[in-house]
Amino acid sequence: MSQAANELSKAPTPDTAEDNAYFPSPYSLSQYTSSKTDFDGVQHKGAYTQGRWKVLMIAAEERYVLLENGKMFSTGNHPVEMLLPLHHMMEAGFDVDVATLEGYPAKLELWAMPHEDEAVMGTYEALKPKLKQPKKLSDVVAKELGEDSDYIAVFIPGGHAAVVGLPASEAVGQTLEWALSNDKFIITLCHGPAALLAASLGRDESPFKDYSVCVFPDALDEGPNLEIGYLPGRLPWLVADLLSKQGLNVINDDMTGRTHRDRKLLTGDSPLASHRLGLLAAEALVEAAGTAG
């Protein structure tokens, strides 16, 4: 550890836009963010040329997570977890539609944006209009999901904002049910798998029971993320814990960039998995699109 990093504050940084809200501490950002990712190229550039199939991204529109101590974490969608997997899918030839629960703008953790990473920044600029004016997810469910839908996959990025609203959303549950019923891909990582909890709404058990997944480790949110000031307090619940209680098999307990495919559910453990998940997703979508025609 560099002396400069060791001298940074571990106190969460106040977000003056909201009462009792905080960004991650300077020290935690020095450990968890960088100006570039591990992106080293795509493997399926221009592989899909038919133009029909698209990816539906469900993004978080909420900025704040209320914690057990009454403080709020100023969060959003993690930009690397959102934009790097999408870069692979878009470069392969798939268009992307963005939806949020109410059609409000998608929120991003801009403090984690790798500003020197051309792949991420280029994808951000390309998608910015859709991120600012996304579709309302219930409208997508009503009008664009069915047996003849043009969506080949549902993508749910990470960031702690994924724990707010998405797990209790009927529209998210309906979207996941559609994907499962129509043999579509579901791609998610880090805290994004919290949205899978919505699939069990109104059911006796989750349709994802017995699926294996990678998620962000609860142990980090309960330990180091508090100690280094990434979070200003404990989360009200933990993603891996609730998924496990619904019968899903969480296969990681650490953060190494691991990815996993179980049937058509593709998952990754953290921002470190973004590049590899993008490679995995692009390959799977190109293969499926070739089969579907």
Image: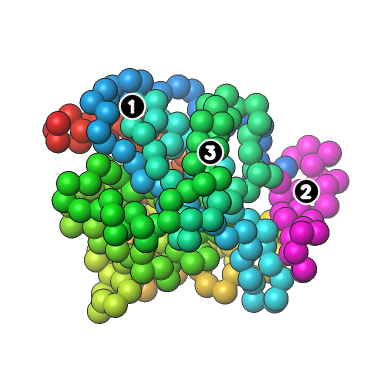
Who comes first in sequence, dot 1 or dot 2? 2
Q: Nearer the viewer, residue 184 or 29?
A: 184
Q: Is residue 207 above or below residue 270?
A: below
Relative to 93, 62 lies left or right = right
Q: Mark 3 points at which residue?
A: 129
* SS at badge 3: helix
Measuring 85% from the left and 46% from the top, which residue is drawn there? Answer: 7
Q: Residue 128 carries which label?
A: none
The residue that mark 1 highlights is 93
Q: Mark 2 points at which residue?
A: 26
Q: Who comes first in sequence, dot 3 or dot 2?
A: 2
Query: Relative to 289, does residue 138 appear above or below in the rendering?
Result: below
Residue 84 placement, left or right of 15: left
Q: Residues within 10 Å of mark 2 (few under 14, many from 20)?
A: some
Please name which of the two marks, 1 or 2, marks the residue nearer to the observer.
Answer: 1
Image-quadrant location for residue 51: top left
For label 1, the SS is loop
- Asked whether residue 253 is in view, the answer is no
Query: Are dots 3 and 1 in contact, CB under 8 Å?
Result: no
What range of the chain is rendered magenta? 1-29
Give residue 251's position: percent from left, percent from top. Answer: 37, 56
Q: Which of marks 3 and 1 is in front?
A: 3
